[in-house]
C-alpha cells in the first residue's frame, strides 16, 4: 500500500452505513493495462456538496472499511456547483502508484468524515488478451440503440425539467410555509393578548358576581328574618295585611335600589376606566416635567460651571488688580520721591540764586572798581562757579548717572537701585528691570 505525506481521513464505518449513490463513476473500463496512467471520471449529484478533504481511493474488492485503500488522490473542488460542467469531474492516478496484480479493484469516493459516497464497478489491471470477444452489431441494432439512447436522453431531460419544476414548487411551498408560520406566530401573540384581556375581564366579572352574591346573601338573611317574623305573626296576618303590603313594597324598593346600585357600579367602573386614563395622562405629564427638570438641572449646572469660571476669572483679575495696585503705589512713591527731589533741587537753585543776588543788591554800583567803566567782567563767572550742594554720581550696577543731594548718599543709591529691580508682590522675589516679561509671567503663574 502506498504511503503519502498526508494520510486521507478514514473511519471504521461499515458498508451498511455508506451512501453509494451520491457520486456516480462514469466510463469505468473492465480492465486497465499496467504501466500507464489511468483517469477516473465521476459525476456529483445535486444533493451532494464536496469538501476540501474529500478523496478518491482504489480499493480491493471485498474491503470492509475505508482504511483498506491501496492508493488515493485528493479531489478538486469545482468552482460553481450549480453548472453542469462542474458536476463532471475527473482525477488521474499515476502508473507508479497503481496495483501490480490482477485482482479486482474499484474506485470509491470518500468524504472528509471517512464516509463512502460512491463506488464504481470492479475492474482489473492486466494486459489486453487476443482472446477478448469482439462484439459485432448490425446497422439496425446500432440504429435501435441510438434511438433508444435518444429516447432515454429525452426522458432524462424531461425528468430534469420536472425536477427543476418540483424544486421551484418546493421553494415556493417553503416560502409559503414560512409566511404561514409567521402569520401563525402573529395570531398566537394576538390570541395570547386576547386571553389576557379575557382573563382580566373574567376576574372583574367574578368580583362583581361575588359582590352580588354577598348582596343576595344579605337579602336572603333578611328574607329569612322576615320569614320567621311572618311565621310568628301568621296568626295576626289578617290584622297586619297593610303592614305586609308595606313590606312587599319595601322589597320592591330594595330591588329597585339593587338595580340602581348595579347601574351605579357600572358607572363607577366607567369612572374608574376614565381615572386610569387620566392617571396615564398624569404619568405622561410627570415624565415630561421630569425631563424639563433634568433639562433645567443641566442648564443650572452649566450656569454653575460658568459662574465658577467667572469667579475664577474674577479672582485672577483681583490678583492682577492687586499686583497693578501695588505697582501703582510703588510708582506713586517713586513719583513722590521725584517730586521731593525736584522741590529740593528748586529750593537749592533758589537759594543759590539768592546768594548771588544779595551781594550785588547790597553793594550796588558803589563797590565797582573805579578804574573799570563796566565793572569786573569775571565777577559773574566766579559767582556761578561756586560749589553746588548737588552732585552727579555713577551707579555701580547699571553704570548710569544719578543725582546725589549730598545729604544721604546711601539713601539715594538705594532708591536708584529700587528703580532697577522688580519685586513680586506675592512671594517678594526680585527680578532685574530688564527682565520685565519674566517678572510678568512669574506674577501670572501665581494666579493659576
Image (tube, grey):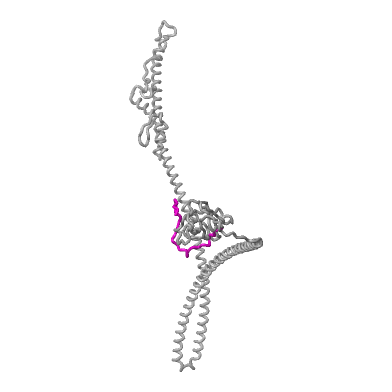
Residue 55 vertical placement versus 371 (above, below):
below
Residue 262 vertical placement versus 22 (above, below):
below
Q: Residue furthest front?
A: 131
Between residue 328 and residue 260, name the one nearer to us.
260
> Residue 382: horizontal and vertical position, in percent?
39, 12
Q: How many marks?
A: 0
Camera sees residue 288 = no
296 horizontally vs 397: left or right: right
- Residue displayed at 35% across by 36% down: 427
Camera sees residue 127 = yes
Residue 58 vertical placement versus 393 (above, below):
below
> Residue 31: horizontal and vertical position, in percent?
53, 57
Between residue 273 and residue 237, name the one nearer to us.
273
> Residue 376: horizontal and vertical position, in percent?
41, 9
Magenta segment boundaries in residue numbering: 1-26
Between residue 276 and residue 52, name the one nearer to us.
52
Between residue 175 and residue 255, name the one nearer to us.
175
Confirm whether the magenta stretch covers residue 122. no
Confirm whether the magenta stretch covers residue 14. yes
149 horizontally vs 24: left or right: right
Quarter of the picture holding the N terminus: bottom left
Magenta highlight: main SS: loop
Residue 422 picture quarter:
top left
> Residue 244: horizontal and vertical position, in percent?
49, 89
Residue 231 vertical placement versus 196 (above, below):
below
Quarter of the picture holding the C terminus: top left
Amino acid at each position: 500500500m502506498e504511503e503519502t505525506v498526508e494520510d486521507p481521513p478514514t473511519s471504521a464505518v461499515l458498508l451498511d452505513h455508506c451512501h453509494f449513490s451520491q457520486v456516480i463513476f462514469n466510463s469505468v473500463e473492465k480492465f486497465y493495462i499496467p504501466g500507464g496512467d489511468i483517469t477516473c471520471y465521476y459525476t456529483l449529484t445535486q444533493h451532494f456538496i464536496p469538501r476540501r478533504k474529500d478523496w478518491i481511493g482504489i480499493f480491493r474488492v471485498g474491503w470492509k472499511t475505508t482504511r483498506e485503500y491501496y492508493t488515493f488522490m485528493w479531489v478538486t473542488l469545482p468552482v460553481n456547483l450549480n453548472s453542469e460542467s462542474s458536476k463532471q469531474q475527473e482525477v488521474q492516478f499515476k502508473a507508479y502508484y497503481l496495483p501490480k496484480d490482477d485482482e479486482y479493484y474499484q474506485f470509491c469516493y470518500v468524504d472528509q468524515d471517512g464516509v463512502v459516497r460512491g463506488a464504481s464497478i470492479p475492474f482489473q489491471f492486466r494486459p489486453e488478451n487476443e482472446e477478448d470477444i469482439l462484439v459485432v452489431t448490425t446497422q439496425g441494432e446500432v440504429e435501435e440503440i441510438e434511438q433508444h439512447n435518444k429516447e432515454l436522453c429525452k426522458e432524462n431531460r424531461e425528468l430534469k425539467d420536472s425536477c427543476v419544476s418540483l424544486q421551484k414548487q418546493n421553494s415556493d411551498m417553503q416560502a409559503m410555509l414560512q409566511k404561514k408560520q409567521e402569520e401563525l406566530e402573529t395570531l398566537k401573540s394576538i390570541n395570547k393578548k386576547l386571553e389576557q384581556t379575557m382573563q382580566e375581564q373574567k376576574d372583574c366579572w367574578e368580583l362583581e358576581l361575588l359582590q352580588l352574591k354577598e348582596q343576595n346573601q344579605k337579602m336572603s338573611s333578611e328574607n329569612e328574618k322576615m320569614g320567621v317574623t311572618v311565621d310568628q305573626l301568621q296568626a295576626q296576618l289578617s290584622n297586619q295585611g297593610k303592614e305586609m303590603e308595606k313590606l312587599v313594597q319595601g322589597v320592591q324598593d330594595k330591588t329597585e335600589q339593587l338595580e340602581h346600585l348595579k347601574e351605579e357600579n357600572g358607572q363607577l367602573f366607567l369612572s374608574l376606566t376614565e381615572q386610569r386614563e387620566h392617571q396615564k395622562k398624569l404619568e405622561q405629564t410627570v415624565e415630561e416635567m421630569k425631563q424639563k427638570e433634568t433639562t433645567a438641572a443641566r442648564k443650572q449646572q452649566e450656569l454653575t460651571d460658568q459662574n465658577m469660571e467667572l469667579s475664577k476669572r474674577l479672582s485672577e483679575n483681583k490678583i492682577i488688580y492687586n499686583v497693578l495696585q501695588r505697582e501703582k503705589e510703588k510708582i506713586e512713591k517713586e513719583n513722590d520721591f521725584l517730586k521731593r527731589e525736584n522741590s529740593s533741587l528748586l529750593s537749592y537753585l533758589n537759594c543759590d540764586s539768592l546768594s548771588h543776588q544779595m551781594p550785588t543788591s547790597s553793594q550796588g554800583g558803589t563797590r565797582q572798581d573805579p578804574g573799570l567803566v563796566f565793572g569786573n567782567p569775571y565777577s559773574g563767572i566766579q559767582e556761578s562757579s561756586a560749589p553746588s550742594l548737588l552732585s552727579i554720581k555713577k551707579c555701580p550696577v547699571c553704570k548710569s548717572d544719578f543725582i546725589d543731594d549730598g545729604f544721604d548718599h546711601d539713601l539715594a543709591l538705594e532708591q536708584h537701585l529700587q528703580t532697577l529691580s522688580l519685586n513680586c508682590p506675592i512671594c517678594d522675589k526680585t527680578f532685574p528691570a530688564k527682565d520685565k516679561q519674566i517678572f510678568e509671567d512669574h506674577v501670572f503663574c501665581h494666579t493659576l
